[in-house]
Amino acid sequence: MNIKEHISEKKPPAPSKGILSDIANFFINKPKYDTFIKFDSSEERYQYNNRIIQRIGIDSDQYSVLNINKIGIDAPVNNIFNELILFDGNPRCWPNHIANVDRINNDFKNIRMLPFGWKRYPFKSMKSFFGLPLIPLFLLKAIRVKDVPDNFDFDNARYVLYECSGGYPIGFLAIYVRSSIPEMGETTKSQLVFGVGFNFFGRKEWQGKRRFISSLWEAVHNRVTANVLNRIKQLSEWRVENLLESVNNPPENNPAKSSLD
């Protein structure tokens, strides 16, 4: 198969066009690749927590919720990381009509998530939704950015560690990209990891007292995250293939070729 034939099979994910397509694409759709890392025991979670401490220096054991999702991507680490720090709610990869991404001062280090894009409650008398402060859904503040790997880091890792506040999740979000490790059975060029650790509304006891809500949230979160990661994978691999085609088939030889914004 030549390069042109191979690339013709690739395409970017279709963008969501509204709330209903957000629901269909991110909440209902079953993604091609499962991304959720399930802990079968408290010991397994403890071991993973130690890896998190070693990698990004944060102890996730202080949080009742710890959700890790990972996917392999056939694209270089730096390409994926650059895609992520430029992210502004691209509806190809994020349910931006439901959870609108608002980059404060257009800076990836400070982001707030707004339900349906609302910056204030729809009625002046409203201060919350049924007693829950959900505007914003949450605030993300980057407390550590590793955009260049250490000389001794053979995994070529890059990451952004966000502190989560406001709304319901009080904790952290880690977005971590590294080269794949063949010894671990990883066959793609890179691995993208989304790690979330938090307590509902800052209260660790919610995990036990409101187990149904916690379980429902985790099921929804993992489905949405899996779809987000699958779409990032599809878009990143398409971009790399498109770049490869541009190098091997310059625009002057293919004037009809266009790129994706």
Image (cartoon, grey):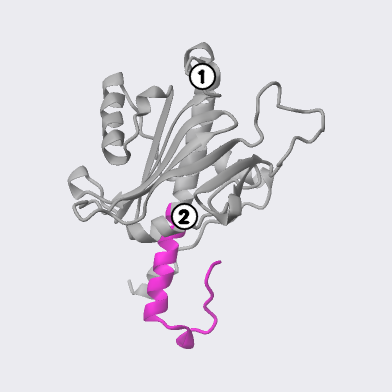
Residue that mark 1 sits on: 203
Above or below: residue 155 compared with residue 65: below
Residue that mark 2 sits on: 85
Q: Which mark is residue 124?
A: none
Residue 20 location in percent, x, y? Answer: 68, 43
Residue 236 location in percent, x, y? Answer: 43, 59
Main SS category, magenta section: helix
- Of 109 and 6, nearer the camera is 109
- Is residue 186 magenta-colored? no
The residues colored magenta run: 233-261
- Of 250 and 170, nearer the camera is 170
Name the residue located 52 percent from the left edge and 84 percent from the top edge: 255
- Answer yes or no: do the residues labelled 2 and 1 have beta carbons within 8 Å? no
- Is residue 254 magenta-colored? yes
Left or right: where 100 falls relative to 32? right
Residue at the extreme right of the image, as rendered = 124
Name the residue located 40 percent from the left edge and 55 percent from the top edge: 81
Please say whether residue 65 is visible from this viewpoint: yes
Q: Give how far apart the Cα atoms at labels 2 and 1 are.
A: 30 Å
Count all numbered tags in the image, as a single digit: 2
Q: Quadrant of the C terminus?
A: bottom right
Residue 50 location in percent, x, y? Answer: 26, 30
Tell me which numbered mark, 2 or 1, is placed earlier along the sequence. Answer: 2
Disc 1 marks a residue whose amino acid type is Arg
Name the residue located 39 percent from the left edge and 35 percent from the top edge: 68
* Circle 1 SS class: loop
Above or below: residue 118 compared with residue 238: above
* Circle 2 SS class: helix
- Of 11 and 145, nearer the camera is 145
Neighbour tally class for label 1: few under 14, some 14-19, many 20 plus, Cα within 10 Å: some
Residue at the extreme bottom of the image, as rendered = 252
